[in-house]
Image (cartoon, helix red, strand yellow):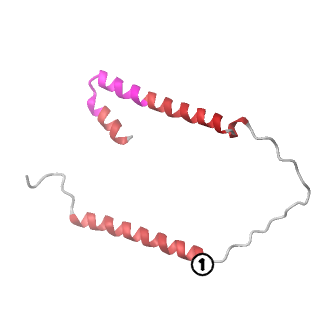
Amino acid sequence: RTGGCAVVDIISVLILVGLLICAILLSMVGFYVGRKSPCLPVPSNVSEVERPIPASKWTKHNYASMIVVGLLILATSYVELQFVMAALWLNQYYITMGYLLTT
């Protein structure tokens, strides 16, 4: 099959590859310049008075954050599955495929 509508122009591909190479080179130059530049002095006033460190909140503990993150992931998966199943039930396959391709 020739002359398909899914053909990408070679100039577009070369432009994208050139932009990728340019971004990589600029990142490397920025890293080198930032690494060789002297540190900026930050003026700060430090008090000599000792202060107590407050106890950490319940949200800082590992188990609480693991439970919260797990519930968020479970809720997100449930909503996504419910949306896809509702679209399949209503014979709206285009919505299902579009949603699955974007997520």
Q: Quadrant of residue 80?
A: top left
The residue lying at 83 percent from left, 47 percent from top is 53
Which quadrant does the C terminus fall into? top left
Q: Is residue 90 magenta?
A: yes
Q: Amino acid at mark 1?
A: Lys
Crowding near pointer 1: few (<14 within 10 Å), some, many (20+)? few
The residue lying at 59 percent from left, 36 percent from top is 66
Report the span colored magenta: 80-95
Taking 93 as reference, is 57 left or right? right
Residue 77 horizontal/vertical position (percent): 45, 31
Taking 8 as reference, is 82 left or right? right
Q: Is residue 96 above or below residue 60?
A: above
Residue 57 horizontal/vertical position (percent): 74, 38
Mostly what secondary structure, the magenta segment? Answer: helix
Residue 78 horizontal/vertical position (percent): 45, 27
Give the total number of marks visible in the rendering: 1
Q: Is residue 80 above or below residue 25?
A: above
The residue lying at 36 percent from left, 67 percent from top is 19
- Circle 1 is placed at which residue position? 36
Q: Is residue 98 above or below residue 14?
A: above
Q: Quadrant of residue 14?
A: bottom left
Query: Hey, which residue is sitting farthest front in the picture?
Result: 63
Query: Hey, which residue is sitting farthest right in the picture?
Result: 49
Q: Is residue 86 magenta?
A: yes
Taking 91 as reference, is 65 left or right? right
Q: Nearer the viewer, residue 3 or 63?
A: 63
Secondary element at image label 1 = helix
